Image (cartoon, grey):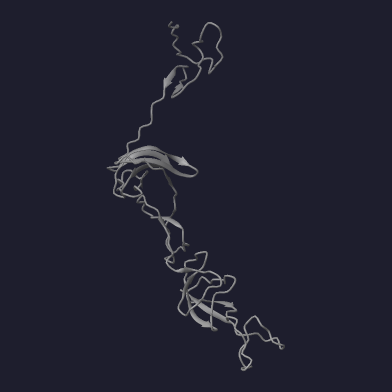
Amino acid sequence: MTGRLVTLNAAKGGINRLRTKGGADPNTLYDLVDGYVDQAGVIRQRPGTQNKITLPEGTKGMCAYDGKLIVFSHVTRTIPAASPTVECEVLNHPSIPDMPLKDIHFAGPFLGYLYVVPEFANGDVFHYWLERGTVWQPNKSYLPGALVTPSAANGIAYRLSSGTQSFQVWVKNVARSLGDVIVPTVDNGFKYTATDVFGPSPKSGPTEPAWPAADGATTFEDSDVAVPAAIDPENPNISLPPQIVDRYKFSGSSGSGSQAAQ
């Protein structure tokens, strides 16, 4: 059954979603999308916005984010000078970096960053949450772990590494030797070299020392380190173990070390 066709060509009564028996009133509107009402009360179609933008060659997908139009590629692309509002984000296959993109199934903001689901040329589909770093600034100090993007965007963010990952992290009560290189449990960008040790069996202290974050600065850790040994009754001049105190409150030898920051 086909209902009676009513052309809504005027909007004298405005938008009214109440429908009385008998059908729609041609002088009212139920809804108006992509249109407007002129001074004569005639409904006009709103003309669409046209943007002419040249996209980089070889990119896939597009979404609006942070005032930019974002496209995607597996390699850095040159953005045409005539399209300053366009940025290209680089998405690499986790195990095959040279694998091109086939399609973008989803791209949109999620919890402050872009969430993207690309499909690569071999059919693999992965999910990416593109954390954005701060734009690089001259004469600014960056701590390890900081995420920085170039002032001229190339689609890649760079995470700062202090280069201390290959050194031993500080642990309490471990043996120390001259020249040992130690880094704090919380990376501050510096490594510390043992420049002096004391006692027969020097080792790290029971608590982590304060680590000065300056070139050439020195920190000190102290610990009782001598291994307890039996006292020879024929040799009364032997040193007491560190945990034993004589009647004059003197204890045995202790070990310690100092370390310089680099």
Q: Residue 254 at what x, y percent from top left?
A: 59, 82
Which one is in front, 78 or 246? 246
Which one is in front, 37 or 247? 247
| Residue 236 relative to residue 188: left or right | right
Most distant residue in the right direction: 247
Indicate the quadrant containing the N terminus: top left, top right, bottom left or bottom right. Answer: top left
Q: Quadrant of residue 115?
A: top left
> Is 208 located above or below residue 115 in the figure?
below
Most distant residue in the left direction: 57
Residue located at (54% from left, 16% from top): 17
Which one is in front, 87 or 81? 87
Q: Quadrant of residue 150?
A: bottom left
**Can the viewer see residue 193 in this picture?**
yes
Count of number-bearing discs: 0
> Is 262 located above or below residue 123 in the figure?
below
Which one is in front, 141 or 121? 121
Q: Residue 200 at what x, y percent from top left?
A: 54, 84
**Can the viewer see residue 66 in this picture?**
no
Residue located at (34% from left, 43% from top): 72
Q: Residue 136 at what x, y percent from top left?
A: 42, 57
Residue located at (69% from left, 87% from top): 246
> Is 32 located above or below residue 252 in the figure?
above
Q: Residue 81 at what x, y percent from top left?
A: 31, 46
